[in-house]
Image: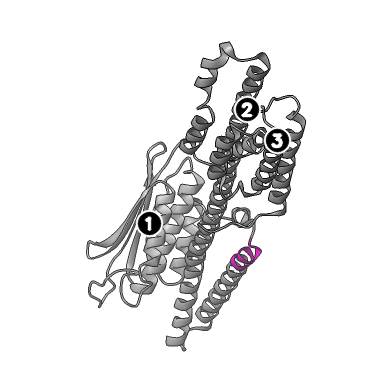
Amino acid sequence: MRRIPRTRRDWAADLALVLFAACFAAVSSQSIPVADSGPAWRAADQAAGGLACAAVLLRRRRPVQLAVVLLLAGTQAHYLTGPALVAVFTVAASRPWRVTAWVAALAFAPLPLFLWQLPGMSEERAGSAVTYFALIAGSLGWGLFRRSRQQLIASLRERAELAEADAESRAQRVRMEVREEIAREMHDVLGHRLSLLSVHAGALEYNPGAPPAETARAAGVIRESAHLALHDLREVIGVLRSGTGTGAAERERPQPELADLERLVAEARAAGGRIELTGPPEGAAPPPLAGRTAYRIVQEALTNARKHAPGAAVRVRVAGVPGERLTVDVHSSVPPGQGPGPGPDRGTGGGGGRGLIGLAERARLAGGEFTAGPADGGFRVTAWLPWQH
């Protein structure tokens, strides 16, 4: 395993435990009896205690080995009790439960012998033994408490990091959704404006001898479409540059409603389109999301018809009943002199299907359904949107 460098805090904790072990041995040396031995044995006991106190500095690298040695040697030497308590605490605080259980079993192994000898043991020696086992039990308990606390802190830190990462992921997902919504708006609005501009510019190019009134009207439509397209483009770029608050900025932009459908069809008819509009239904208006989605679907369908089937007749039907659903159906026929084609945004020269994919996504986000494909010798786009009270 890779060795982790010891920090200043770790060094401070280790030195404090060395000092604790030494002070414990010094303070308790007069209260706990030692074996009846001469000064040489007592000096050896003190020297072993000093070495044991110094060995406490190894508790992070070899806690189990240190605890085993000190527990075995501590049965014969009083001055090893303090270092043994530190070693047992370290094992309980940093090692798995199974290892801690084995060390605890070793520490309490002399307990049955002590209980068997207790009736014939002096009161002073019995009190010393009880104190020793109580201290060992306290060291184990404190180590287990510290281990559980560290695990709890680590778990809380991990949960906080996961929550932060999840919040960042959600924020990123929201930003992406907002940007995708802006991209759809940009595609729908600018595509519609630019297609009108292209139609009128093409009419001027291929009909240079048109009456002045018609030329002026086409130039006015071109100017107005270009102005509106530029305005929408500036709005979108401003929202994207802001970086923050894109959702609020997008909500502040005026959004079309189903009532604006007649104006949209009028613009398309002014560009030379042959469009038949049925609806929208009279009475209560559908929810804003359903109305805006229906408007965008018709707008994209008319734009595709101008791009891929110029001159074709288009039938737009919008019907629905409150409490049920709103139906949007746009059918474009094949223009004169042209055979059945692949349909809007589906040919090699089209938009790669991105327009229809965007419409399908819009309908899905509104809780509805969307279909598009060849039908009745032309191309049909149909959407069903929920119309709640």
Q: Label 2, on which residue?
A: 138
Disc with the residue nearer the chain's start (1 vs 2): 2
Q: Indicate which disc, 3 or 1, sits on the residue closer to the N terminus.
A: 3
The amino acid type, in three-letter code, at marker 2 is Gly
Q: Please tell me how crowded label 3 is: few (under 14), some (14-19), or many (20+) other residues with Cα within 10 Å.
A: some
Left or right of 261? Residue 321 is left
According to the image, label 1 marks what residue?
A: 360
Q: Which residue is identified by label 3?
A: 42
The residue type indicated by label 3 comes to: Arg
Q: Nearer the viewer, residue 127 or 142?
A: 127
Q: Residue at x 40, y 58 (%)?
A: 359
Examine the image and state in which quarter residue 347 appears.
bottom left
Q: Disc 1 residue type? A: Ala
Residue drawn where x is 52% and y is 25% of the image: 110
Which numbered mark, 3 or 2, is in the foreground of this view?
A: 3
**Residue shown at 60% from the left, 65% from the top:** 240
Secondary structure under tag 1 reads helix
Visible in this render: residue 159? no
For discs 3 and 1, the disc positioned in front in the rendered view: 3
The magenta stretch is 236-243
Asked if residue 313 is positioned above or below residue 100 in the image, the reply reads: below
Q: Which secondary structure is most common in the magenta stretch?
A: helix
Crowd around label 2: few <14 · some 14–19 · many ≥20 (10 Å): some
Where is residue 183? Give x, y as percent: 50, 64
Q: Is residue 319 magenta?
A: no
Residue 313 placement (x, y as % from top left): 32, 66
Please tell me in which quadrant of the rendered image residue 249 appears: bottom right
Determine whether, in the image, residue 370 is placed left or right of residue 80.
left
Q: Is residue 84 visible?
A: yes
The picture places residue 46, in percent across and down from the top left corner, at 71, 39
Q: Residue at x 42, y 45 (%)?
A: 281
The Cα–Cα distance between marks 3 and 1, rounded to whole angstroms, is: 90 Å
